[in-house]
Image (cartoon, rainbow, N blue to C red):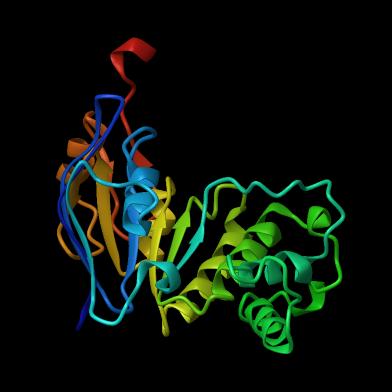
Amino acid sequence: MKIIVELRNIFVHYRNNLILEDINLKIYEKDFLGIIGPNGGGKTTLLKTILGIIKPTAGQVLLCEGLEKQNCFGYVPQTSHIDYMFPISVLDVVKTGRLSKNKLLKRYNTNDLDTAVDSLEKMDLSKYHNNLFGSLSGGEKQRVLIARALTTNPKILLLDEPTSNVDSKVGHHFYELLNELNKEITIIMVSHDIGAISQNVKKVACLNKKLVYHDSKEISKEMLEKVYHCPIDLIAHGVPHRVFPVHKEDE
């Protein structure tokens, strides 16, 4: 399998604080990588470093031959800057993914519209074209934002906490859609949902400044203890159930 992105000895600092330390990671074509870890552990920073939004203090982000950062990534951030009260339709939100610096003052063309419609279909949102974006549920909004990211025809899709506002029933359908997309594109997803990650992705990495990664979906007791810095009583592989002991300061 071809390596599509490689991180070599990545360090990132912010205001003299070390955010990422010596990150080494190979991501292969059509991987579905889940990244877990505590708040403040650098997960969003890692995604932005891969995208080129954040420049590493040291190290390299390498793309396979033929890929360029400006057109190979689709990105859905953890929080959207869309004003939910603004009266914009679902289709118009998705079409904004087709905007580029040289098209800001131009009208959308037929290809833009067709691509937006196709992206909505991939996310099972065809019937919502004319709905107001703000009227949708949290899960539906998230799928719309992924559809927008898909309008660039990315080779790699990066998702930051895409299921944070989604219940388990909706989440199951959501992962079915992602697994269908994964047949064509590479997916890198940050999530706090350890159970869902362990069941739905192909590989798992744990991040808390340093990366713990074994090129598999196995989540071991040792991996989590390294990342969360607390003992774990039970790891039930393949079952969304984790038991963390009470910390002394919480007793």
- Name the quarter where the N terminus is drawn: bottom left
Q: In which quarter of the image is residue 7?
A: bottom left
Residue 251 in sight from this viewpoint: no
**Residue at image location 22% in from the left, 30% down from the top:** 229
Q: How many labels does the image show?
A: 0
Which quarter shows the C terminus? top left
Above or below for 27 versus 184: above
- The residue lying at 48 percent from left, 79 percent from top is 181
Residue sitting at 23 percent across and 76 percent down? Answer: 64
Q: Where is residue 135 in the image (x, y as percent from the top left)?
A: 83, 55
- Where is residue 153? Give x, y as percent: 51, 79
Q: Is residue 168 above or below residue 78?
A: below
Residue 22 visible (yes or no): yes
User: 29 or 16: nearer the eye?
Assistant: 16
> Residue 247 at x, y = what percent?
31, 19
Above-or-below relation of 120 to 136: below
